[in-house]
Amino acid sequence: MDTAARPPSLNARLAELREAWNAHRPDYAQRMDDLARLRAAFKRRLAGLIEAMSADFGRRSRHESLLTDGMTVLHEIDLVRSQLRRWMRPRPRAVDWTFMPASAEIRYQALGVVGIIAPWNYPVNLALIPLVSAIGAGNHVMLKPSEFTPRTSEAMAELLAEVFPADRVATVLGDADVAAEFAGLPFDHLLFTGSTPVGRKVMAAAAPNLTPVTLELGGKSPAIVAPGYPLATAAARIAAGKFLNAGQTCIAPDYVLLRAQDREPFVAALRDYVQRHYPNLRENPDYTSIVNARQYTRLQSLADEAARRGAQVLTFPDANAHDIDARVFAPTVILDAPEDSRVMQDEIFGPILPVVTVESVDAAIDYVNARPRPLALYHFDHDRARTRNVLESCVAGGVSVNDCIYHNAQSELPFGGVGPSGMGHYHGHHGFLTFSKQLPVFRQTRWSSLSLLRPPYRGLAGFVTRLLTR
C-alpha cells in the first residue's frame, strides 16, 4: 500500500518520531535514563497493569501475571542497563594479513524508528520486552498493543506517556484495520508477535517498504517423552507448561509423543496434577480464563470435531469442569485424534493436549520432522545419546530438555522461531543486536600495503598478485 493510502495520522506520528530521532539520537546516558525511569514507573504501575489484565481476561492468575508479565520485564530492564555500555562498545575484528597494518571493527548503530505489534496473550511482556531492547539499542519506538486486551493497552499507553516524550515512544490504539495500516508503515525495523497466518500478512505489508521484520509466531510445539523417563515427572512438567495462562502461550507444549504402553499412566498423572494444583477449578483464582468468547468457541470446536471423528476427549478434573459463562476451559486431553483433524493441524493455543503414541524416540523424530518446524521442542529423557540425537535431528525455534517453557526465560539465550514459527531473535543481547545495525568499519593506516596492487600489474605488482592467488 502506498503512503498516500494510509491514514495520515499514523504517517504523521512516524514522521514526528523519525524527525526527533534524527535531531537527537539517544546516547548512552539518554538510554540509561529512559530505562531507569521506565523501570520505576513500571514497578509503580504493576498492580494496576495486573488488574487490567485480569479484567481483560475475565480472570487471570495474579501470580502468573506477576511472574510472566512483571518479573520478566523488570529482569530485562535490569539486564540491559547492566550490560549496555559493554554492548555499545565497538568490537575490534582481525584483518587479513594481506591488508595489514590496517585495522577493522564493528560498531553498533541504532536503526531509527522501530515498530512493535504486540499480542494479547502476554500483553505486557510481549510489548515491553522488545521495547526495552529497542530503547537500549538507541531507537525510537511506535507500539501497537492488542485490541483484544483494551484495558491493558490503555494502561500501557498511560505508562509509556508518563515515561517518554511523544516523539520518542508513541502508542497506537485501535482494531485490526489499524494494525494492518501500522504494518505497512516504513519503519526501520518491525517486530510482530502473533499467529503464523497473520505473520504472513504482516510480512507482505512490510515488503513494499523493504522493512526488515522479526516475526515471533507459533505452531505446534511437540513434547517427546522417552522410554524410561519418570512419567509422573514428565506429566507434571508438561502440565505446568501447558496450563500456564490456560495454554494461551505460543511456546506451550501442543501435543505429546510417547509409547503406547506409557499413555495410560501418563494420562493418569496428568489428571492427578490437575486435581492437586487446581482444586475447585471453576472458581480457582490460579487458573486463567480464556481471553474472549471467540477463542473459547474455537477451542470447544476443536474438541468437538475430534470427538465426532472418534477421538476420546477427557476433561479434568471431571466432565463438568467447563464454565462457558466465565470462559473457564478445563484442562482437556485428546486421545486417538485423526491426523487430519483440526486439533492436530492447527495451533491449539489453549488447555487442550493431544497425546500421540509412537513406537520409539526415532519414530517421534520422524513425526516431528514431517511437520512444519515448531517454535519450541521439549524432550524428556535421561539418556544423553538419545537426547543428543533429538537435538541434532530436529530443527526448532528453541528447546528445553526435561522441562517446558524455561528456555524462554534465559536472558543469554535468543528467543525466536524458524520457518513457519518465525524469523529473527530478541531477548537480552540478541534484542540489542536485532535493533542495531552492525556497522563494519575498515581503517587504513598512513602507509597501505594495498599500494603494491595498483596498475600497471607488472614487476612487483604482478609478483604480489601471483603470490596471493597461488
Image (spheres, helix red, strand yellow):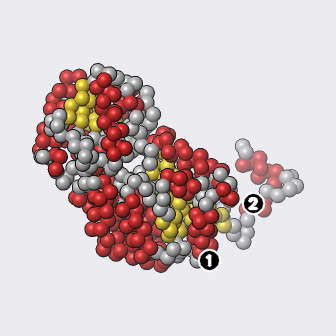
How far is disc 2 from disc 1 in space, using C-alphas? 38 Å
x%, y% of residue 92? 55, 64
Q: Amino acid at mark 2?
A: Leu
Q: Residue at x 59, y 75 (%)?
A: 20
* Quarter holding residue 375: top left
* Quarter holding residue 447: bottom right
Q: Residue at x 58, y 63 (%)?
A: 10
Looking at the rendering, in which quadrant would you find the C terminus? Answer: top right
For label 1, the SS is helix
For label 2, the SS is helix
Task: Tell me if mark 1 has few (under 14), some (14-19) or many (20+) residues whose alpha carbon lies within 10 angstroms of its own.
Answer: few
Quick one: 381 or 171, which is closer to the camera?
171
Q: Amino acid at mark 1?
A: Ala
Question: Which of the labelled discs sits on residue 450, or is there none?
Answer: 2
Left or right placement of residue 183 versus residue 118 in this view: right
Residue at image mark 1: 23
